């Protein structure tokens, strides 16, 4: 008998204990078996609670991993190595993804043999403020949670254990392979910027960003055309965060690294790529 594989794998890292896990599970309980939700419970500071895990009753569309990972990237990697579906996305447990819209979008990607899908998103607190999918919008708002990847594209990739910038680095590596991209104007994700104890609120992790930039530049220089330009602009946006939250020395070092490489990334052989970015065309 042929093994049934889900159309879409969803990976959700969960730092335990979590006040959001059950509400996320409730919101996805009727998602259907064409999706498989992979929850990765990270007992980083507690020790794995086998009794708590045993109390969780899984639905056919859920799968559970647990361990002491210490970073969202390592937690995601645990599930990523087990994924078998055709498409894949990464969500955060404290947000409000539009699961049905994502599944419909995935069907569209499959029908067109697309490698990467980029969806619009909004804030849970400001639902009318929609952020779009143009190259410059992605550079400005590169949340990995609004991306759908073809598993084949990223199956052998892994997140670093950086606390900040690891998701953007993963996205840059995937896009540096110059995949076929399709976008949707539909909102597929609602981001909660006020969630308690979120990873982005821990500003001490900003010191991870220069290392993320260093690793990303090698990927950027393999990208082509408008993707290459968008990724470079993405790193420039990240530089603002480095200046805001780290030391002047670290920020200036990061700036010089980008300036040294950006001339090659943006201008060599592809003088029209920047124009394409400003014209909002992939």
Image (cartoon, helix red, strand yellow):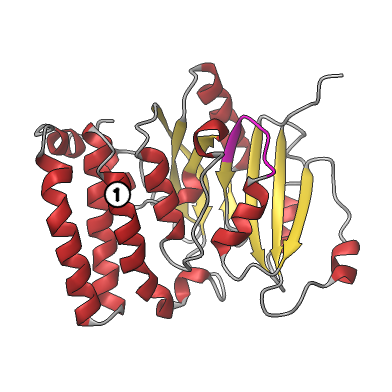
For the question of whether residue 165 can be seen, the reply is: yes
Seen from the viewer's position, the closer of residues 281 and 227 is 227
Inspect the magenta stretch and tell me whether residue 59 lies in it.
no
Is 127 positioned to the left or the right of 25 in the image? left
Name the quadrant containing residue 270: top left
Q: Which residues are magenta?
A: 82-88
Say if 194 sits above or below 191 in the image: below
Give the overall secondary structure of the magenta segment: loop
- Residue drawn at (36%, 61%), measured in percent from left and top? 212
Question: Badge 1 is on which residue?
Answer: 218
Question: x, y percentage for residue 173?
Answer: 39, 45
* Image position, residue 219 (x, y; %): 32, 46
Which quarter of the image is occupied by the N terminus? top right
Closer to the camera in the image, 119 or 212: 212
**Circle 1 SS class:** helix
- The vertical placement of 94 against 145, above or below, is below
Decide: few, some or many residues near mark 1? Use Cα within 10 Å; few <14, some 14-19, many ≥20.
some
């Amino acid at each position: 008998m042929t093994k049934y594989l889900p159309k879409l794998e969803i990976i959700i890292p969960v730092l335990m204990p979590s006040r959001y896990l059950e509400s996320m599970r409730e919101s996805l309980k009727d998602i259907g078996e064409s999706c498989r939700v992979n929850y990765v419970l990270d007992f980083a500071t507690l020790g794995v609670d086998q009794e708590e895990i045993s109390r969780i009753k899984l639905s056919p569309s859920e799968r559970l991993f647990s361990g002491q990972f210490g970073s969202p990237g390592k937690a995601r990697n645990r599930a990523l190595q087990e994924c078998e579906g055709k498409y894949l996305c990464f969500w955060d447990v404290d947000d409000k993804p539009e699961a049905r819209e994502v599944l419909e979008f995935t069907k569209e990607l499959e029908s067109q043999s697309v490698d990467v899908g980029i969806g619009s998103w909004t804030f849970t607190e400001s639902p009318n403020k929609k952020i779009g999918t143009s190259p410059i919008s992605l550079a400005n708002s590169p949340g990995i949670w609004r991306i759908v990847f073809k598993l084949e594209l990223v199956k052998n990739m892994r997140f670093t254990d950086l606390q900040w910038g690891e998701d953007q680095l993963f996205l840059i590596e995937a896009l540096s392979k110059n995949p076929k991209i399709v976008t949707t104007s539909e909102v597929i994700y609602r981001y909660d910027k006020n969630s308690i104890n979120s990873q982005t609120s821990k500003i001490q992790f900003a010191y991870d960003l220069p290392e993320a930039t260093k690793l990303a530049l090698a990927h950027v220089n393999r990208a082509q055309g408008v993707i290459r330009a968008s990724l470079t602009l993405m790193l420039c946006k990240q530089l603002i965060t480095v200046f805001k939250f780290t030391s002047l020395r670290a920020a200036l070092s990061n700036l010089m690294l980008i300036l040294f490489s950006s001339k090659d990334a943006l201008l060599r052989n592809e003088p029209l790529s920047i124009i394409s970015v400003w014209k909002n065309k992939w």
